[in-house]
Image (cartoon, rainbow, N blue to C red):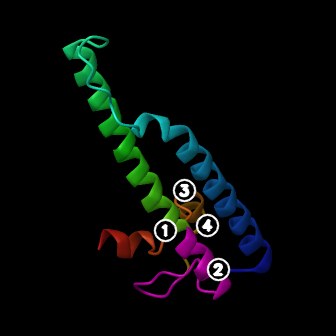
Amino acid sequence: MNGSNATRFRGLIEARLTQIEDENALGRGGQSVVELDQQSVGRLSRMDALQMQAMAVAQQKRRDGEAMRLRQALTRLDEDEYGYCEGCGEDIPLKRLELDLAATQCVSCANG
């Protein structure tokens, strides 16, 4: 990958990591402990709150996984390995990298 593309993708990856951090900050409130005070909240409202909490936790796990993959992509950029398929060693098409900044395989190897 040439220098201008590497710089461009580094910027895209860092911007997405910042966006994930912002989403994490917003999502922390949804993961808080659900109060089970029966006087203030009805049974269905508590069940709804527990479901919302579970969804917030699942979203947090998804964001954490994506952030980890993106940090690994930054490491590959530092080592001049970014953009090369781990399966066959060929270039990963730029369009694929634009769709998935942390892609490690070309389409053929990913499908294979």
Mark number displayed over residue 77: 2
Front position in the image: 59 or 77: 59
Q: Which amino acid does label 1 sit on?
A: Arg
Q: Is the magenta stretch mostly helix, strand or loop?
A: loop
State the separation of the CA atoms marked 1 and 4: 17 Å
| Of callouts 3 and 1, the N-terminal one | 1
Q: Looking at the image, which residue is at 32% across and 31% down?
A: 34
Q: Can residue 102 be seen in this view?
A: no
Number of on-image labels: 4
The CA span between labels 2 and 4 is 14 Å
Q: Which of 27 and 34 is in front in this view?
A: 34
| Marked residue nearer the N-terminal end (2 or 4) | 2
- Residues tagged 3 and 2 counted as in contact (Cβ below 8 A): no
Q: Is mark 2 on a helix, strand or loop?
A: helix
In front of the other: 40 or 91: 40
Q: What's the distance in space between the residues labelled 3 and 1, CA to CA?
A: 14 Å
Q: Residue furthest right?
A: 4
In reply to whether residue 78 is colored magenta, the answer given is yes
Question: If the image is split into quadrants, where does the N terminus sit?
Answer: bottom right
Residue under numbered circle 4: 94
Q: How far apart are marks 3 and 4 (CA)?
A: 9 Å
Instruction: Identify the element where label 4 is drawn.
Output: helix
Residue at mark 3: 99
Sequence-first disc among 1 and 4 = 1
> Which region of the structure is painted magenta?
71-90
Tags 1 and 2 touching, CB below 8 Å: no
- Residue 95 image offset from top left, x and y in percent: 58, 61
Residue 6: give its label. Answer: none
